[in-house]
Structures are given as structure tokens and as C-alpha cells.
Amino acid sequence: MLELAVWGAWAEFAVRWLHVITAIAWIGSSFYFIALDLGLRKSPSLAPGAHGEEWQVHGGGFYHIQKYLVAPDKMPDHLIWHKWQSYVTWLSGFALLALVYYVGAEFYLIDRTVADLEVWQAIAISVASLAVGWLIYDALCKSRFGEDNTRLMVLLFVLLVIMAWGYTQVFTGRAALLHLGAFTATIMSANVFMIIIPNQKIVVADLRAGRTPDAKYGKIAKQRSTHNNYLTLPVLFLMLSNHYPLAFASEYNWLIAGLVFLMGVTIRHFFNTMHMGGGYKWWTWVATTALFIAIIWLSTLGQPGEAQEDSASLPPAIARFAMDPHFEDAYWTVVGHCSMCHAEQPLWPGLHWAPKGIVLETEAQIARAAQTIYLQSGISHAMPPGSTVLMDDLAREQIITWFRSATGS
């Protein structure tokens, strides 16, 4: 029978796959419609009430697209709604957050050298921050302050930087940047679920009832859609940041995150102005490059060393791995085969930091990474990579025996 660790790993893979698939669908449709909207052209042959049109060619055929700024005179017989991509992306993303960071809170979410939280407290902060973030953002959009979209975007940027700093004060660096991505993605998906789709439904209901729809609903939805457009690229960076310790394991990780949001603005501005027919704003790539160089520089300034935990002070869920009678054999196996790369100062030529920020030198560090070690070097041969350091079957069996003994599987 497959053990819980294996089921968990495959469940995480399945949910991650779903998340990536739906995110591609959502981002693809979002970018397409923004480009379409910005590229609309006026024409004498436009239908009454139409705002603009475009001719496109794709897949061997021609497409003639017209946009109505408010709505057509009557309800079309066939109407396609673009909403499920957003909903399933958020739902699968939250499920992945729960599988990795809530179930594995003591491994990935909580850093007791940052904030000594209980598991339930860390999860409560995580969930509450996502909800509160949307409420604050929505209130700002609906206030008089939100009537000026440029002013609103600047304030939103300030809010995101504050949240980036705040997350680093309670979670691990890896979890902090991931949560900032989830915080932003929640705003984006809630825009679709709470504002854009309901407003479109009001317009549809008016058409069916023979009433003239109010143009304000389209204007509000357009504002939220524009915000989503500029937030998409930073969210992608933050969701991938857990693979890059230079981004999250830095004293300035919150500032790096802030610069990433500015990069998202400069990149999208280039494409948005291009689609509008405003030419190529090459200065945006100069600005993007400068921001990226600043991020690289910041990542080298602050690489805080991991606090040296005593294995006796580990939380129970982790301490069991250090207290297991088979731990000593597994410990020396890991040190002998893994620590030349997974070290504060790696000895392997060309490595300047531990891969994925995973350091395996002390008993506490190895106990914390028990499940990763088991999956990567016990039941699979993913690590050590290739033939860099040969690990024989006996060494792998010691890891398997240790993990299964500690978990009772």
C-alpha cells in the first residue's frame, strides 16, 4: 500500500498541474482581451452602438470582432462567459497552498526564529490576510480615491510593498513571497467573481428586460480588468519564487518583491501601448533591465544565515525524525552524500549557495527536510543528481528505514 508521503506528493503534483493549466487559460484569455480592447479601430461600417472593431487572422481563418462599449440593442442568442478559468485557478491555488503550507506548516510556513507561532495561528494569519486584503482593496476602489486610476494604482503598489514586508515578519522567506502572490491573486480572482461578472450579469438582465444598461457597470469592470492586467506578471514571479532562494532567502526579499511589481508595470506598459498603436516604448525595457539588475544586487546584499536550531527544541512533528533510533545512520548518509552541495558554503565547484536554499548540515536541518530527503533520495533517485556523488542502495535504504520508522509507515 502506498504511504501517506507518496500520496501527498502526487496529490500536490495533480493540484499543481491543474493550477498551471487553468492559470495559463486565465492569463491567456486576459492578455488576449486586453490586446483586443486596446487595438480596436473605428470604421464607417460599424453597427449602431458598436465602439470599435478588429480583423484578425489565426489558424487559417479570418475573424471579424466588434465591441459594444455598453451593450448591443438586444441580447445575443449565444454568449460565452470567461470566468471559470479565474475561479478554478484560485481554488486550485488555495488547495495547493493548503497541501504544501498548511499541512506542512512546521516545515514550510513557520520560522520560529522569525515568529514563534502555533500551526493554527500561522494558518489563521494566512487565511485572514487574503480576505482582509481584498476588503481593503475593494473599499479603496469604491471610494472617491479610486476615481483616479493612476492614484489608485500607486496606493495599491504601496499596499503590496507593506504586505510584502509584513509577511516576512511572520513567515519563512519562501512562504512570505508565495503568500504575497496569493494575496495579489486573491484580489485578481475576486475582481472577476465579485465585480466583473456580476456587473456583466446586470447588463445582461437589463437587455433581457428591455432596459438600457447603465454604462457605469462596464466602466467599473474595465478598471478592475486593467488592474488584473498589470498584476499578472508579478504574481507569476512570486508563485515561482520558491524555486529561487536568491529571491526569498534574502534580507531584502520584501523589497525585491516590490521591484518585481514595478517590472510588471513596465513590461505590460510596453505591450499595452504597442497594442494601442502608440509605437514601441523601448524605454520600458531599459527600465525593466535596471529594475532586474537592482533585484540581483539586492539578492547578494542580505543572505541571512539560518539560525542553528538545537534538535531538542524542534516542534514535535519534526523532532520525531531527530529522535528516531535510525536517525544517526541516516544523518551520516545525508552528510556524506548531500552536504557538499546543501551547505551554507557549498564545496561543489560552481555552486555559490545551497540548491533551493535547502541546507543539510545540522541534525535539525536534516530533520526538517526529512520528507524531501525521503522522496528525493529514498524512494526515487533524483538526488544526488546524475553521477555527481554515487549513492548506493544501502545508503538509500537507510534513509527509507529512518523515515518510515519515524512516521510509523
Image (cartoon, rainbow, N blue to C red):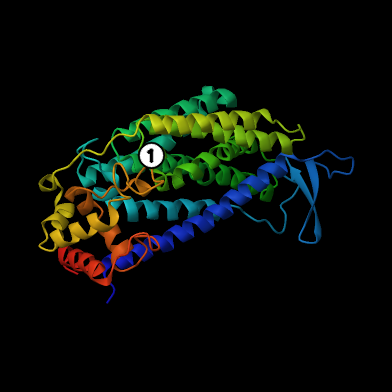
Question: Which image quarter holds the C terminus?
Answer: bottom left
Task: Using the image as rendered, state which of residue 47 and residue 271 is in the foreground.
Answer: 271
Question: Which image quarter holds the N terminus?
Answer: bottom left
Give percent across and percent down for residue 380.
34, 67
Looking at the rendered structure, the secondary structure element under dot 1 is: helix
Give percent across and percent down for residue 227.
56, 36
State whether residue 136 appears in this view: no
Give percent across and percent down for residue 47.
84, 45
What residue lies at 51% left-to-right and 39% top-to-bottom?
A: 234
Task: Using the image as rendered, state which of residue 118 and residue 76 is in the foreground.
Answer: 118
Residue type highlighted by circle 1: Phe
What residue lies at 27% left-to-right and 63% top-to-bottom?
A: 374
Would you call the spot at circle 1 few (<14 residues within 10 Å), some (14-19), or many (20 or more)? many
What residue lies at 44% left-to-right and 42% top-to-bottom?
A: 181
Asked where in the image residue 4 lies, by quadrant, the reply is bottom left
Kindly identify which residue carries mark 1: 248
